[in-house]
Amino acid sequence: MKKLLFYFLLISAGNVFAQAEINWLSFEELEDSLQQNPKPTFIFFYADWCAYCKKMERNSFKNKAVIQQLSHDFYAVKMNAETTDTITFDGIKFYNEEVNEKRNPTHQLAKLLASRKNQTFILPAIILLDKNFNLIKREFSYLTSEGLLKFLRN
């Protein structure tokens, strides 16, 4: 009986610590996942130079409640808004057409999902989409773990 209890506790502890980080998907992986099992999508656009993006990665995205919420209720995508990669999503190829034109070139996919009319593109950009890939809401600022949880729940 003691052995059985020990194994039960060991398995339970393993489940608690199993999801220690967010399972970030690429857009290609997201497309496959949405086709198999539609659910809401969380997208985080960042750049290597963005101090607030790095702060969110160090703090907000390490919070256990945030990890659990994102892992359970959403597909999570993290994308460098300045990538030079060509990304195919929904049968359309997206690329960074500003590579040789601007100091901080923004990828087409980031501009499509995170641009606002008559406002400059800023980071961090956080997008929440429903299971049909319709916009629920967007945020363009640093969010603490508490702020991020509020964003995900409202």
Image (cartoon, rainbow, N blue to C red):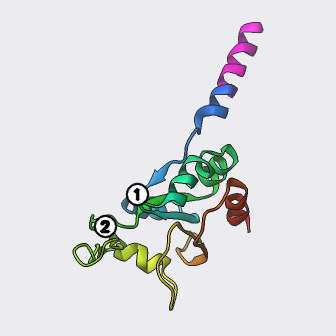
Report x, y in % for residue 73.
63, 57
| Amino acid type, mark 1 | Asp
Q: Look at the image and say whether residue 3 sits in the magenta stretch.
A: yes
Q: Is residue 115 above or below residue 54?
A: below
Q: Residue at x 35, y 72 (%)?
A: 107
20 sits to left or right of 16: left
Q: Is residue 123 above or below residue 49?
A: below
Q: Is residue 50 above or below residue 110?
A: above
154 sits to left or right of 141: right
Which residues fall within the magenta stretch?
A: 1-12
* Residue with the mark numbered 2: 87
| Amino acid type, mark 2 | Ile
Q: Residue at x 73, y 63 (%)?
A: 150
Q: Can the viewer see residue 154 in this picture?
A: yes
Report x, y in % for residue 124.
52, 66
Q: Split into 4 quadrants, where in the image is the N terminus?
A: top right
Q: Residue at x 42, y 78 (%)?
A: 111
91 sits to left or right of 142: left
Helix, strand, or loop for circle 1? loop
